[in-house]
Amino acid sequence: MQGRISRRKLADYAADAAQSGSLTEAIREIAAYMIESRRVREVQLVVRAIEDELAARGVVVARVATARPLESDLKKQIAALVNAREIHIAETLEPELIGGVRIETPGKILHATVKSKLLALRQAKI
């Protein structure tokens, strides 16, 4: 029986594969392992571990939520703000944010949305 592979080792394997250009195959293998070993509930934790390992190697996956599609100059500003060798932006549109941007990277969150500022004002009771 095969021993349990740690999330950290799975993340290292995926990050190595990303650098060698074979990430798709590595993700398939990791997914098959997770299913076979009945660890499907840990998928989000494995994804987070992979993103953390990539960030440690200078490749950052940033989740960006805005009310309207990002323009190229804003994408460049986000890349400069994150200060990574390489950045991949996963953009989602959330009209309820009204305006501004929410950026999530491994270990950091920037809430610069109109919605978050309005909620802060409501909590301050101004």
Image: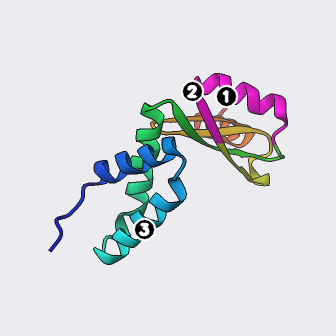
Q: What residue appears at the point 74 percent right and 53 percent down from the top-left corner? A: 94
Q: What residue appears at the point 80 percent right and 45 percent down from the top-left corner? A: 98
* Number of other residues with Cα within 10 Å of mark 1, as a class: few under 14, some 14 to 19, many 20 or more: some
**Residue 8 colored magenta?**
no
Query: Start and end of the magenta stretch?
Result: 70-88
Residues at circles 1 and 2 in contact by the CB criterion of under 8 Å: yes
According to the image, label 1 marks what residue?
A: 79
Residue 104 vs residue 31, the one in the foreground: 31
Q: Position of residue 99 (x, y in %)?
A: 79, 40
Q: Is residue 4 left or right of residue 126?
A: left
> Does residue 114 lie above or below 48 as drawn?
above
Residues at circles 2 and 3 in contact by the CB criterion of under 8 Å: no
> Does residue 37 lie above or below 9 as drawn?
below
* Number of other residues with Cα within 10 Å of mark 3, as a class: few under 14, some 14 to 19, many 20 or more: some
> Does residue 119 lie above or below 24 as drawn?
above
The residue under label 2 is which amino acid type? Ala
Q: Secondary structure at mark 1?
A: helix
Q: Secondary structure at mark 2?
A: loop
Disc 1 to disc 2, C-alpha distance: 7 Å
Question: Which quadrant: the N terminus?
Answer: bottom left
Q: Position of residue 23 (x, y in %)?
A: 51, 53
According to the image, label 3 marks what residue?
A: 31
Disc 2 to disc 3, C-alpha distance: 27 Å
